């Protein structure tokens, strides 16, 4: 009898050891909270949800992605702060938000009229991605994927075509972004810092008269109602990335990370492709269905030259203050070489 009991104990111990050492069971469950301003239900939100589904399936449910879309966790400054204190572990941020982590990312977006085409945006990002990803990694973040959604546009409650027109209006700027606010002030604009979630209310109440926004956001939030005029000018692209805290990423088993990274890059590519096409579609929808009045600017004409000259006048202030000098210079060098090659369109 004693030998039988001993055998049972040995078998049970072996079974428990097998369970404990099982790769699936031993793998600690990880919950990643991701924040973003992308509107809930938008194609961008759905792409992130598919990314989460892929993570769950690839990890047998041990890695769970929880998405807080629509800015419900605050603006991008708040998102960065939440990651710093581990209230969230990942975010999809524009370059404006990412520069709080790594200022060099500002070189992809925060230089008005620097880029002449989206092909140029693609080229500069492709060339600078290794450097920027290394800098973000050194600051504690891993880039899971890059995307842009085309050009932002100026939406206003009165027609805007010239620089002087915009300078007469109260212009939205992101709260907590003092350097940009100071730059706009020094250039003769009238910035009003607000949380992005307050743009619509600000336009409805007269707190602001104009906002620089991607068209898909203007359509999703009905900005076209209090701001029925849009200036069609390629001022800056909207570039961003999905990032995750390095310590959280590296806590996921190394063998699983390549599959999760592949799913993340697929989501970023989907957002990139959809963003560009939906930007054009959003403008057409607002124009035909909601009476948006599009103010067109002739390429190479006097008004565009005025905007370009005004933007160039701000470059000495932007260089070294908003965009690190080495990044600013490298973007210019890459663009000059690309244009000189005859490839740029």
Image (cartoon, grey):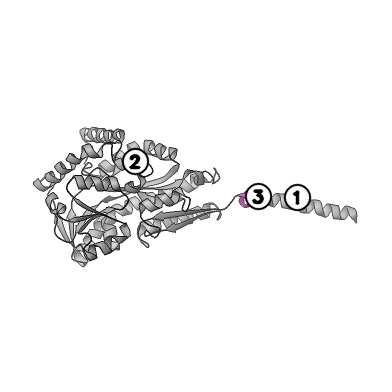
Element carrying mark 1: helix
Disc 2: CA contacts within 10 A as few (<14), some (14-19) or many (>=20):
many
* Residue 192 vertical position relative to residue 288 in the rendered view, above or below: above
* Residue lying at the far right of the rendered structure: 1
Dot 3 or dot 2, earlier in sequence: 3
Q: Position of residue 90 (x, y in %)?
A: 44, 50
* Residue 261 vertical position relative to residue 1 in the rendered view, above or below: above
**Would you say 15 lies left or right of 281 here?**
right
Q: Which residue is mark 3?
A: 22
In the rendered image, the quadrant that contains the C terminus is: top left
Q: Which residue is mark 2?
A: 103
Q: Which residue is mark 1?
A: 14
Mark nearer the viewer, 2 or 1: 2
Say which residue appears at 19% left-offset and 44% top-offset: 186
Gap between marks 2 and 1 measured at Cα: 54 Å
Q: Position of residue 11 (x, y in %)?
A: 79, 52
Element carrying mark 3: loop
Q: Is residue 228 magenta?
A: no
Of the pair 268 and 172, the residue shown nearer to us: 172
Which stretch is magenta?
23-29
Is the Cβ of the residue at disc 1 closer than 8 Å to that at disc 3?
no
Mark nearer the viewer, 3 or 2: 2
Element carrying mark 2: helix
Disc 3: CA contacts within 10 A as few (<14), some (14-19) or many (>=20):
few
Say which residue appears at 25% left-offset and 45% top-offset: 118
Of the pair 278 and 192, the residue shown nearer to us: 192
Q: Is residue 162 visible?
A: no
Q: Is residue 25 magenta?
A: yes
Dot 1 or dot 3, earlier in sequence: 1
Disc 1: CA contacts within 10 A as few (<14), some (14-19) or many (>=20):
few
Tell me which corner region of the image, top left, top right, bottom left or bottom right, holds residue 112. top left
In the rendered image, the quadrant that contains the N terminus is: bottom right
């Amino acid at each position: 009898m004693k030998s039988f009991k001993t055998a049972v104990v040995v078998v049970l111990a072996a079974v428990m050891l097998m369970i404990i050492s099982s790769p699936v069971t031993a793998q600690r469950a990880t919950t990643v909270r991701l924040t973003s301003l992308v509107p809930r239900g938008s194609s961008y939100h759905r792409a992130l949800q598919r990314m989460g589904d892929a993570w769950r399936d690839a990890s047998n449910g041990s890695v769970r992605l929880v998405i807080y879309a629509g800015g419900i966790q605050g603006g991008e400054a708040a998102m960065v702060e939440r990651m710093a204190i581990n209230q969230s572990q990942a975010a999809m941020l524009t370059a404006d938000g990412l520069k709080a982590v790594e200022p060099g990312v500002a070189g992809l977006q925060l230089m008005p009229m620097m880029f002449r085409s989206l092909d140029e945006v693609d080229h500069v990002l492709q060339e600078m991605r290794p450097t920027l990803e290394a800098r973000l990694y050194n600051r504690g973040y891993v880039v899971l994927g890059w995307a842009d959604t085309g050009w932002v546009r100026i939406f206003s409650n009165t027609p805007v075509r010239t620089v002087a027109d915009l300078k007469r209006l109260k212009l939205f700027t992101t709260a907590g972004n003092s350097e940009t606010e100071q730059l706009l002030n020094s250039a003769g604009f009238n910035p009003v810092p607000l949380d992005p979630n307050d743009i619509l209310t600000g336009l409805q109440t007269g707190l602001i008269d104009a906002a620089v926004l991607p068209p898909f956001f203007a359509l999703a939030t009905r900005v076209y109602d209090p701001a029925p005029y849009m200036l069609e000018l390629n001022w800056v692209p909207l570039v961003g990335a999905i990032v995750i805290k390095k310590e959280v990423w590296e806590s996921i088993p190394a063998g699983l990370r390549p599959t999760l990274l592949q799913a993340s890059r697929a989501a970023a590519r989907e957002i990139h492709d959809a963003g560009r096409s939906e930007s054009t579609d959003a403008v057409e929808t607002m124009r035909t269905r909601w009476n948006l009045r599009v103010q067109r600017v002739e390429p190479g004409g006097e008004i565009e030259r005025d905007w370009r000259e005004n933007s160039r006048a701000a470059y000495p202030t932007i260089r070294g203050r908003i965009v690190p000098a080495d990044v600013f210079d490298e973007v210019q060098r890459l663009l000059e070489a690309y244009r000189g090659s005859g490839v740029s369109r």
